[in-house]
Each structure stands twice: as structure tokens, then as C-alpha cells.
Amino acid sequence: MAVLVRSRHRGEKVEPRSGDFMLERGYAIERLAGGLTYVSNVEISPDGDIYFTEAGFSYPYVFTTPRLCRLNEDGTHDTISTAFDGPLIGLAWYEGDLLVTHSGALARVTTGGAVRTLAGDLPSVGDHHTNHIVVRNGEVYFGQGSVTNTGVVGPDNLLPYGWLAAHGDAHDVPPYDVTLAGLDFSSRDPFLPVEIVRTGAFLEFREYSMPGQVVEGREKATSAIYRADPDGGGFEVYCWGLRNPFALGMSPDARLWTVDQGADDRGSRPLPSKDAMYEVRRGAWYGFPDWFGGQPATVLADRAEIDNPHGFVLQDPPERTPPAYVFPHEHCTPTQVDFCRSEDFGHFGEAFVAEFGSGAPAATGGRFRRSGRSIVRLDLETMSSVDFYRNENPGLGGTGPERPVALRFSPDGEELLLADFGRLGVPGTGAIWRIRPE
């Protein structure tokens, strides 16, 4: 049987309209399917079949049914399985099956819908979740975000993030023993607003720390990238110290990369910071919860003029690996990265990064922030970036992708598939798109 490496799906070409969206000259964009709900990922098999996921979750804490689907050539789709806990995020093709991550789990799914859990009970009940997947040399890598914004449970984890009432014992967990500096952060108790409480890093809400206190590491840690075999064996923490390593990608030279989302302006330790890209290396520590986007918490706290302490929460931390690239704007929220492998597409070897855009006002201290909602391409040699696609008219009036959330090059590299989440909390506004050279 002949192997197809490009999608066979019919698309509806959308012309850029002045002031609506920008697409780099020389490329055309087509809508393959619309009316989808909270699309979170897209994948294309070696024979040209397109699969996608609907997360089953959107901020501000709207829950629907998570779905793994196959896209038909006419734009309709078939549901393969709904046997997941939202959000359903990661999706990767592997030897005739699909690997997925959903809340607290890595699973392998046949195209007929049989689901087998490979790793479960991961710490995914807080702000961030179990994230994107990359397969390299027959090994599976995937990210696990932090429970909290900056390592400390606070009132923001009840409002607006909502999980503190149901998971009062949740907190960030290191993969190895760490020693605390004894730095605590004060906040109003959201359950009893007249009370002021203290909370330390890596501890439950209202639990304060002591200088020299050791927090025991666990295999199923937060703020980490895991490695596992495709059958679930060999599970381990590969590296850690990443606030929310949502995006993972492999460059043509087989190096692994992750894009880490910067901290928000919220909670008892608000440290608004930029997003960053790192090369993924075994055993590395990237700085969380004391460094964000290449900046120390001390500098970020001074800039934010917060009332709580401005110091580091870790005593004698490991050696830190700095970012390879820092995105120029706060709250662009990178969510997926893939690399061009085709000279015919253009920009061979460059990273293409989907930027979801700001989670304002909850993530920005109540301020409006228009950033992201783009695809940027990043030259790894010069570490410089430009917009490849940009949504210039978000909301009801726009005709292009609303919130790019994931992207994937076809196996031959000659087309780029894009998952469009749609509008936050509004079902039926997501879509799958295809970008090709004209």
C-alpha cells in the first residue's frame, strides 16, 4: 500500500482580511473543520489520517466531555474515545496507536478506541496539568506542570482557580529532597477572610516552613518532564524546575526542547514573568520555584512591588540551567512547538511555536493584556523570532484561528496543521486549520 504523508482532507481557504489576521506572505490557510469545543491538540499519522483532541476543560473552569477524534475528509469527525479525565492535552502517534495525556495520566489508545493507562496518579489537581508528548528513539517524554503559580498555595487557588476546596492537601512536590530557606508568605484565608495565614513553598495551605526544613522528594513530582517506555515501564523524572512545561518538541538534530510558561500576577507570591524555551537535558534543574523566564524571584518581586518577602524559598539549590530563549512579551502563553523539516515549506530547521495568548484578567492582576494568539517561528541559530501568524481581531469579528493551542507538521513537512482552541469558555468555537505554501 502506498504511504501518504500529507492529509487528504478538503479545506475551506480563508483569505486574510485587512486588520483581521496576518499570515506570512507566500502561505495560504484553510479551515478543515469548525464547530469544535476546546480543541487541545492535533496529530497526523504516517498514512495521512488526522486525529485531534477536545480537552473537556476551559478556563474559567468550564467542564465538558474530553474526546479523542478522527477527522474525516469532508470535515466531519468520528469520536474514538471519551474515557479520559479532562483536560485531555497530549497526543502523539506511535506504532499504529495514539499516546495521550489527560489529567494525571499517560495512556495508549488504539485507533479502535481501546485505552490502556501507562502511568497514573500524577499530581495534576492544581493550576496546571499533564502536558504534551514527544517520542524520541522509542522513548516517551511528557511534561507535568506545577500545582501553584510560584510554588506557594494561596487564595488564588480557591478564587479564581477553584481547586483548593476539593484538594486542600495539594501542593508542589519536588522529585528529590530539597531544603527550605524558611521563607513564608502571608495572605488572607479565602475560607475565613478575617484571618491572615502563612504558607511555605512545597507545603499545604496554612503550613509554614522552618529554615533548614527538608521536603522529601517523590517519583511523581510536579514541575517536571517525565520519561517512560511506550509500555509504561522505565518511568522516571528526566528533569525538573519548570513551572509549566506545556510544550515539547524535537528538532531535526534530535534534541528535545520545552517551552515553559512564565508566572502570573496573582496569589501571595505574584511574580509576573516572561515565557522561556529550554533545551531538555537529563538531570537538569531550570530554577522553579525561584527563577522564572531567566529572572530570579528577587528581581521579579522588586519589580512587582509585592508586600511579601522577596527572597528565595530554596536553600542550597542545584545548579541552574538557563533558558536558551526568552519570549519578548509576558503572557503570550506558548503551548506547542514543532520544527520545520522541509525545504519546500520554507524555514527549514526553525521552531514554530503556538502562542495561546493571555489569560487576562485572572493571570494579569486584573489588567487587560493583549499578547500571543500567534504562531511565531524561532531561528535556533540566532535565537531570534518573528510572527508567522497573528490574530489581530480576536473575538466574534475574527475569521482566522482564535487561539492557536497546538501545531504539527505533516510527516513530509510540507504542511502545518493547527489546533485552534476557540474562545475561552465558549463551546463550538474551536477549529482545525491547515497552512501550506502557496
Image (cartoon, grey):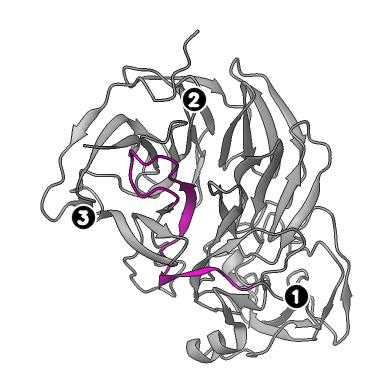
Which is more toward the observer, 274 or 146? 274
Per the image, label 2 sits on a secondary structure element best described as: strand
| Left or right relative to 1: residue 36 | left
Which is more toward the observer, 158 or 436? 436
The structure residue drawn at horizontal position 49% and vertical position 25%, both measured from the top left corner, is: 69
Per the image, label 3 sits on a secondary structure element best described as: loop
Q: Position of residue 273 (x, y in %)?
A: 50, 75
Q: Amino acid at mark 1?
A: Arg
Disc tally is: 3
Image quarter of the C terminus: top left
Per the rendering, the mark at residue 101 is none
Using a 10 Å C-alpha cutoff, classify the residue at mark 2 as few (fewer than 14 neighbours), some (14 to 19) or many (20 or more). Answer: many
Q: Amino acid at mark 3?
A: Asn
Q: Position of residue 120 (x, y in %)?
A: 76, 40
> Magenta stretch: residue 330 in it?
yes
Query: If you read the primary sequence from the N terminus, does the residue marked by circle 3 or circle 1 appear first?
Result: 1
Query: Given this view, does label 3 or label 1 mark the residue nearer the observer?
Result: 3
Q: Position of residue 377 (x, y in %)?
A: 38, 56
Magenta residues, start to end? 322-349
Query: If you read the primary sequence from the N terminus, does the residue marked by circle 2 or circle 1 appear first?
Result: 2
The residues bearing labels 3 and 1 have C-alpha atoms spaced at a distance of 43 Å
Q: Position of residue 284 (x, y in %)?
A: 73, 65
Residue corresponding to mark 1: 206
Is 303 situated above or below 158?
below
Residue corresponding to mark 2: 69
Per the image, label 1 sits on a secondary structure element best described as: loop
Per the rendering, the mark at residue 393 is 3
